Amino acid sequence: MEENVHNVTTTLTCDAHSSWQQFLDYVRGRCSQTAFENWLAPITVVETASQEICLSVPNIFVKAYLLDNYKQELALFFPLDTQGELAITFVIGQPKERVAVVAPARPSPTQQVAEEDLEFQLKLNQFYSFDNFIEGPSNQFVKSAALGIAAKPSRSYNPLFIHGGVGLGKTHLLHAIGHYIKQHHKKLRIQCITTEGFINDLVDCLRNKSVDKMKRFYRSLDVLLVDDIQFLQNRLNFEEEFCNTFESLINQNKQIVITSDKPPGQLKLSERIVARMEWGLVAHVGAPDLETRVAILQHKAEQKGLVLPNHVAFFIAENIYANVRQLEGAINRLTAHCRLLDQQITEELAEKTLSELFQLVPKQKVSVEHILKAVASVFQVRVNDLRGTCRTKDIALARQVAMYLAKELINDSLIMIGAAFGKTHSTILHACKTIENKIKNEESLRRQIALCRRSIGN
Ligand code: ADP
Ligand code: MG
């Protein structure tokens, strides 16, 4: 088992930047702010072509501090070698960034283009494949569109415009298209860039007077994948160059895929480019529903070698629902905890470890009415029953849950809350105590209450 976990970690941590970020997030809450700023913040990840992790430290003291104090924690986020030692190398001082190479671009006919290929290498996150993308009602359409494009570039929809909120898989799908095309259409020249990357390249090229080279490179592509086009807003000079590149490619029937946090019509960009982006297919990626979130959690847990009982996955998915990145964060934290403390995963452990990530209901806006409605629907009773005096077991329990939630969610005195239920404050207090005791042992009740909270939150 232990062996297995290490292996999984080894393959997972190749995305050194995100592992380092996760490590920082993990230790941030466990050391003083000053220690963090002085010792950990100055460390950066150096990109290398190989699988090993390389950290840049300003001096040997920082390296020694890191290894002396955080060896165990580092082992949670970074690969170990066959001897069980951390597979991390260090460079001292400010290194020149080396660039990660996913694969060499296709050899091109002229020396000139080959040189340019070296400069604009294709970088894709190796984990963002179609296989690793969990499908559900909120993303089925966009995934099929992406697969369609990947299978037949320039012969289905062009451009494909993917939009949706943060952390819902837009970049993942974009890179998945990239991987697929690289594998199945080896001859096609493909580039994947963030809009910021495009702008930065352009700035560099302007400075080096090599804009022509960049133009030549981009306009010779067969497939251009552009991430986060919203960053082109308010960048007037760059918008024009981007628009020219875009039109030049589209006019040669070259495939373009764009992602954005909003639909084309809501972007503050020129009408010309908005119209161009609406030409093809505009596909929305939404927040995943409960079942999909559970499937995502299980998939990520499996990749980490973490055994996640299904009811705990449901519990987490009920409490984290806006964003897939947070689901990943939850799995990373749980993995770290379970390995450090050598504990089994239970709902309690999940609640304790993840409570900051859970999306809590804002206190002020909730009314007794909201609560009664939510409780009635989760417990399958009528609101009138909850207001009434009937003492059958199911109704009495649901009524107590409503009172318990009212005390938790409404910022008011027990007397006022009691009045809203037509009860005394001691009845409310008794209900709260009863429920508090029950949920210590009854997972299903805890889950029902979590559902109520969520439905109140919506
Ligand atoms: P966006 O670009 O929309 O902000 P990302 O593509 O960066 O979001 O996704 C955030 C994280 O969540 C990534 O690590 C990605 O792999 C993961 N993710 C998002 N959607 C899914 C999904 N449907 N299945 C598996 N992982 C997903
Ligand atoms: Mg993204």
Image (cartoon, rainbow, N blue to C red):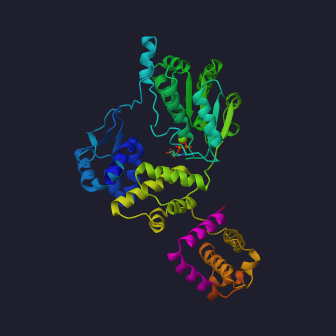
**Nearest to the observer: residue 387 or residue 385:** 385
Residue at image coords 66%, 42%: 284
Chief secondary structure of the magenta portion? helix
Quick one: which residue is furthest to the top in this view?
A: 110
**Nearest to the observer: residue 358 or residue 449:** 449
Q: Quadrant of residue 247?
A: top right
The C terminus - image quarter: bottom right
Where residue 20 sits: x, y (%)? 38, 47
Q: Is residue 435 magenta?
A: yes
Residue at image coords 47%, 50%: 300
Region rendered in magenta = 428-457
Answer with the quadrant where ligand 2 appears in the image: top right
- The answer to whether 340 is drawn above or below residue 296 in the figure is below
In the image, is 423 to the left or to the right of 13? right
Where residue 383 sits: x, y (%)? 74, 74
Where residue 171 sits: x, y (%)? 54, 39
**Nearest to the observer: residue 149 or residue 410:** 149
In the image, is 81 to the left or to the right of 260? left
**Nearest to the observer: residue 315 or residue 432:** 315
The N terminus - image quarter: bottom left
Quick one: which residue is furthest to the front in this view?
A: 1
Quick one: which residue is furthest to the right in this view?
A: 384
- The answer to whether 286 is drawn above or below residue 367 in the figure is above
- The answer to whether 56 is drawn above or below residue 394 in the figure is above
- The answer to whether 214 is drawn above or below residue 279 in the figure is above
In the rendered image, is residue 148 in sight? Answer: yes
Where residue 154 sits: x, y (%)? 62, 24
Q: Is residue 196 magenta?
A: no
